[in-house]
Image (tube, rainbow, N blue to C red):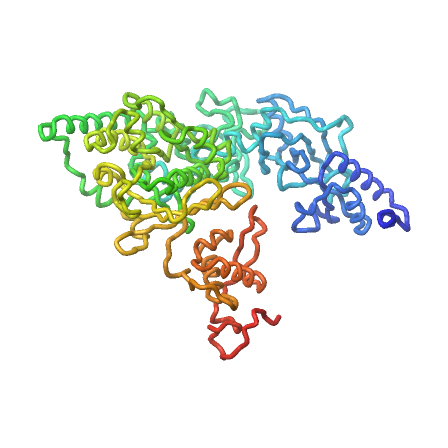
Amino acid sequence: MAAVCRHHRLRPMTVALERLAEHARGYAALGWAMVPIKKGTKRPPWADWPRRATTDAQVIIDWLEGHPGDNIGILTGERSGIWVLDIDPRNGGDEALADLEAQHGQIDAGVEVLTGGGGRHLYFRYPADRRVHSGPLALGLDVKADGGQVLAPPSVHPDTGRPYTFEVSSTEVGDAPAWLLDLVCDDSRHREPTETIPREELAQSPLAWDRFNAQATNETTAALMQEAGWKIISRARNGVIHLQRPDLYEGEGKEGTSATIGAVTGAPGVLYVWTSSMVDEGWEPEHTYDPAVVLSRVRFGGDDALADEWLASQGFGRRSRFADPETIMERWLAHAAVEAALMRQGSDADDPWADVDIEAVLTSEPLRPALWARSDGLKLLYPASVHWVSGEPAAGKTWMALSMVAQALQSGCHVTYYDFENGPLPLLERAEALGIPRRRLTRQFHVKHPTVSWVGHEERLIREVVSTGTRLVVIDSCASAMSAAGLDPIDNADFGTFFIFVRALAATGAAVVVLDHLRKDDAPTARYPLGAGQKLAQATVAYGLARTAPFAPGRDGQATVYVHKDRHGQVLQAATRLGEADVIGKFILDASADDDLIHALLPYDEGRHRVASTPHRTPPWDVMQGVSDLLVDMGRPLRKTLIAAYVKAPAVDVDIAIDQLVQRGYIAEDEDSRALAYVLVKPYRAEWDPYSPFWAGASGVSTNGSEDQ
């Protein structure tokens, strides 16, 4: 009876409301989630509208009855099973769409809505196996997908007062053509170019190529393209520049977008070419080009080595690893020949030494780490360097290497992984467990699992690293790699042969990580991995892992990470000295989540966050301050598992401290995190808390664990 009374109305609906109600029922039948839209706007009335969107038509109808003039919006994206292409003719949308259709083929949309503002909405079925990227597609074309919504018929436009209507030939929502999906899905080439390196990393690089890319702006690239005869047709408010190719619409007085700068990746200066008419000039359609590549194409005929040399001569930095692969190969082969001769002939070999350019050395900038960041932002892997990572079995070496891989892939880098131990399936299962998207694994992750000796194939492997632009190389592990080549892992001469190949990989500019096992009689902080002590001497950086909790399926793993050697010194100066050892952090693998494993390298800080080791019977004031200090230092949301791992206190005290801080408004649950995490609202200090025994004010205040409001 209550349900019947809920829908009983004392007065009939207006015609406008009846039409809205009819459409709402139709949308609900299609499974499209809806939200009300405030009168005179295109916005829902709530900040959390994606969560409150509903497929219950009556909920929407009841709202509209109580808020005359409000409209209906449809949630786009996977939840409703649709995405929408928004065409704005006032900003060139019709022309941009016509250009795309001329290049790729006609779009046949099953459902088309004519908007009250004179535009069009094309509705398409959301793909089952891909993710549609919301945002601008071209000038006047916008994609509405996950996290978006559109006004739906019979809503009225807030500015014109004209209704949204279905185009008369609309039937049912169909699939978008394959070429359009390639453009709008975030696994397409142009959404995530293979070399999208954070700008701050490029700025710190000593390489001229990287520094030019870091300093370039949209205007830099636009000026270069103008040299090649391209025309600037517009500059958007957000800085995006639209270009028209040479000879397009010549003498016709029309304009059309052939390329954009700064629109697709968001990185300044990055060119994205739409047109397919400039292939003969070296511009592939649906490709991104960073500013240095544009410079190379425009001024040096695509000769990256010449462009790189010119950039170095202009003071941007030193010659880059992007130089001609033949040059890198020549350097490696010469280096290999010299080292092989030295090993064969000893002191009788020809003298390979040359005078060092002292001026160049003294004026060059120190090499800085560029990959694998600790949770506080400190990076630990140097480009063009060899990093030795050793540890006992189950110390988490492979897990930590895959954590490095995950960060590198996330930043757009390519990674090459030489797997001599695990096999491809276990390795990739671990990678996916860490939350690495499959599209990144298939596009940026190059796994080698050789079943024969790699000796004799070195030249091919070096060329592959160069051609893919690999920035991180992992060898798992040293002993297995040497054994596969018939080399003795504990023989110095054999190790020298192996290290020629390892050093050649680093000569490409990539950070090389070699995993190795500790001798069984070594202490956890031992400096030497299995076999010859020459390994430590040859490596640029050496890390050691000492597990504090084993890395096993379904269990949380922890390992202390030691720095045994750092030739460049940038990492070692940030380490914590503990007795005779230098500690750089704790590697954490959190297996408590229902979905992806949480992995992080946390700073090792014995002082700032260490608190009492016995449980409190009253609210743990010092633990509360430790949690607050941690969130202040990290500057980002943290899960309870990571808080407990870092704030060294009994688990019960950490739980009480978090609950108290939440109840009293110092921290809050982070709504944007997919798993429960906590974010700082305001810092807590025990000496500021009148209920704390550490309060700096009057003594004798009762500590009842609550605050008067």
Which x, y percent locates residue 373?
A: 40, 45
Which x, y percent locates residue 264?
A: 52, 35
Rendered residue at 27%/44% (across/down): 522
> Front-most of 567 and 150?
567
Residue farthest to the left? 348
Rendered residue at 27%/56% (across/down): 579
Residue 212: in sight, yes or no? no
Quarter of the image containing the C terminus? bottom right
Q: Is residue 488 above or below residue 534?
A: above
Residue farthest to the front? 521
Judge left or right: residue 286 versus residue 543.
right
Judge left or right: residue 82 versus residue 504.
right
Instruction: Quadrant for residue 501, please give it.
Output: top left
Q: Is residue 601 above or below residue 685?
A: above
Rendered residue at 59%/28% (across/down): 181
> Front-most of 630 and 291?
630
Which x, y percent locates residue 517?
A: 31, 38
Instruction: Quadrant for residue 228, please give it.
Output: top left
Judge left or right: residue 560 versus residue 99.
left
Which x, y percent locates residue 145?
A: 63, 37
Residue 169: in sight, yes or no? yes
Q: How many marks?
A: 0
> Front-most of 444 and 186?
444
Instruction: Quadrant for residue 55, please give it.
Output: top right
